[in-house]
Structure formats: C-alpha cells, structure tokens
Amino acid sequence: MGQQELADLCELSVDQISNIERGKSWTGEVSLSFLANAFEIAQKSLLDYSENQAFIESGGLSWRASRKKNTLTVRHSKVEIAFAKKKRL
C-alpha cells in the first residue's frame, strides 16, 4: 500500500504518513486509531511486537539504530556524539 492510499484511508495527509513512517512525527491516539482501522488490526498491534515472531527473530527494530559515532558541527567546530547502548529487556 502506498502512502497516498494509506493517507486516504486514514484521512491524514501524505506528509503526516511520511513523518510517522520515518519517526519524525509524534503520533497521537486519534492517528493510531485511524491507522489501526485502515490496516484492520487492533490499535495495540501497532506498538506491541510481542506476538510477531518473524519480526522478533529478524532482530526487531535494533537494525535501525546506528552504532557509529555521529559528528555535529556547531559554529564551525566539530563535536563527536556517542549514544549509550540501551539494555534489552
């Protein structure tokens, strides 16, 4: 399903769908409800991966997290940023 089709089903803008997909936008209760209805799933399923065995076995969301140090330029000076590893539960 493309972003336009999902946006039409959810009555959200394509920009909102794009921002949600990329984690650039906070998603509220109403938007989650629209998304769940569009996918014909329980709203809880959008955030709870505990019953999605294929997702868990593939490593879940951990592949998205960068392990490299990032560089931030602040007024023409480079600053190195390191993020601490989160403990898995």
Image (tube, helix red, strand yellow):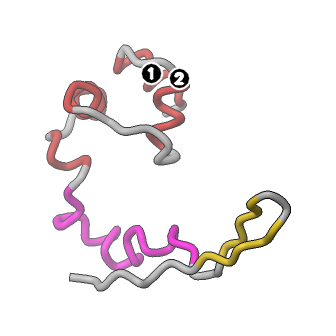
> From which residue to which does the magenta span run?
48-66
Does the magenta portion include 51? yes
Query: What residue is rendered at 17% in x and 40% in y?
Result: 43
On the rendered structure, is 61 left or right of 44?
right
On the rendered structure, is 13 left or right of 77?
left
Disc 2 and disc 1 in contact, CB within 8 angstroms: yes
Q: Which residue is mark 2?
A: 14
Task: Choose top left, top right, bottom left or bottom right for residue 54.
Answer: bottom left
* The C terminus lies in quadrant: bottom left
Q: Amino acid at mark 2?
A: Val
When the figure is inspected, residue 47 is found, relative to residue 15, above or below; the finding is below
At mark 1, the secondary structure is helix
Of 2 and 30, the residue lying toward us? 30
Question: x, y percentage for residue 1?
Answer: 49, 33
Q: CA distance from mark 2 to mark 1?
A: 5 Å
Q: Amino acid at mark 1?
A: Ala
Of 24 and 7, the residue lying toward us? 24
On the rendered structure, is 6 left or right of 15?
left
Q: Which residue is mark 1?
A: 7
Query: What residue is rendered at 78% in x and 71% in y?
Result: 78
On the rendered structure, is 67 left or right of 21?
right
